[in-house]
Image (spheres, rainbow, N blue to C red):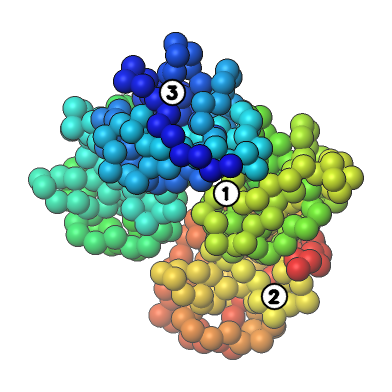
Amino acid sequence: LTVLFALFINRVNVRLVGGHSRCAGRVEILHRGLWGTVCDAGWDMPDVAVVCRELDCGEPVDAVGDAYFGPGSGPIWTNRMMCTGSETTLKKCGSVMFYEYDCNHDTDAGVICSGELSITRIIYSVNVRLVGGHSRCSGTVEVLHRGQWGTVCDEEWDLADAAVVCRELDCGEPVDALSNAHFGAGSGPVWMTFVLCTGSESTLKNCGSFGWGKNNCGHSKDAGVICSDKINVRLVGGHSRCAGRVEVLHRGQWETVCDAGWDLADAAVVCRELDCGEPVDAPGDAHFGSGSGQSWIKNCRGNESQIHLCPTSSSHKNNCSHENDVGLVCNISVRLVDGNNPCAGRVEALHRGQWGTVCDFGWDMTEAAVVCRELDCGEPVDALSGAYFGPGSGPIWSHFKLCNGSESTLKNCISAELDFYDCDHTKDAGVICSEMYTGLDV
């Protein structure tokens, strides 16, 4: 069953199909005049390294399977590649005939190389990067000026600005424009503030601003971006991008996940992939409405970087229907503690990697409405003061929060430090929302 053999003759060619550039896509090889695909059995980074080198596409970024770039057609020329990583061309790698593995075009292998981005940066002198996110397409925005990397202030930072960054990095469409050092505080100069992009500029440097280094911003206000590229999961039907029905991208179609076997490990992978913090709740029974198309069962270990890397099986085996579509609520930067359920408790905010409380000065139903919306907990029932849910610990991040009620997250409300009001943990603010979740069933 494991007969090694040389696969190709000298005229074999390799190409990548279905990606955003010539250096990313489904692997296809030309053999006997016909293009065919490669099975993902055993497909790993040494194999990818050979493909990237052969196509002059730089270093390997990812080895992907399960028809990540869509299923191919025609023959599957090899079941399992066996490259050491040092070969100059894929034709010099051996192959194992691995009959136990059921190869079809749903298991076509793919490649992501670094080279196209590097070439773009050299040709167009692109000088922007994203730092601290879970992929090269999310993170704190940094720009290169006079040979030094610095950050961008979040004053007036919005999706039009984020769109320019995503386009400049070939990262698809903007998903979110983030503020308050969401990905952690940067270092060095704050190069730009009050960035005013129309959204059509080819580079962030072409957008208007107050001028290089002319600002009073600190790194606690560094701007961030999340772009759509390589996002294979989304949350639909909730009140924020971090709450809703779980949908995964398969063969170019958005499909749902069955709640059979769905647990904290699966939920954690999705929240992490979307840069939405930790899971708060994962209700089943189509809590966020029924989806369409195929439904899948995911069995994640919890350490996967993306849900498409988790083992998958058809939901038909568990008699799943769209009435069993699973939902998810993730927590970006606020939580409710010591209440009877995740939608009631003392308000705690995450800042600079540490949880702290909010002072009750001026705390009212407007602020409570923002918290309830952010946590997808329905409408505010009460805004509480005097450490109603018990005193917290750690820092008191804000003495005074002033929201207008329309903000998508509490961190977007105006904050102020009030010297005349003596805040301590006996004055921690609390919230009760209308929704009553029962928590993760794990």
Callout 1, which amino acid?
Leu
Residue 40 seen in render: no
> Circle 1 sits on which residue?
309
Q: Specify few, some or many for label 2: CA neighbours under 10 Å numbering under 14, 14-19, or 20 or more.
A: many
Residue 117 point in image, percent of width and height:
30, 34
Element on which disc 3 rests = strand
Residue drawn at the location 77% of the way across and 42% of the way down: 314
Above or below 334: residue 123: above
Residue 344 seen in render: yes
Element on which disc 1 rests = helix
Q: Earlier in the sequence, mark 2 or mark 3?
A: 3
Callout 2, which amino acid?
Gly
Q: Which mark is residue 345?
A: 2
> Circle 3 sits on which residue?
29
Residue drawn at the location 51% of the way across and 35% of the way down: 109
Callout 3, which amino acid?
Ile
Residue drawn at the location 44% of the way across and 53% of the way down: 134
Q: Nearer the viewer, residue 118 or 425?
A: 118
Q: Mark 1 and mark 3: span between their CA atoms?
A: 24 Å
Residue 16, located in which quarter of the rendered image? Answer: top left
Which residue ends up furthest to the top in the rendered image? 33
Residue drawn at the location 42% of the way across and 73% of the way down: 417
Element on which disc 2 rests = strand
Above or below 25: residue 211: below
> Taking 414 as reference, is 406 left or right?
right
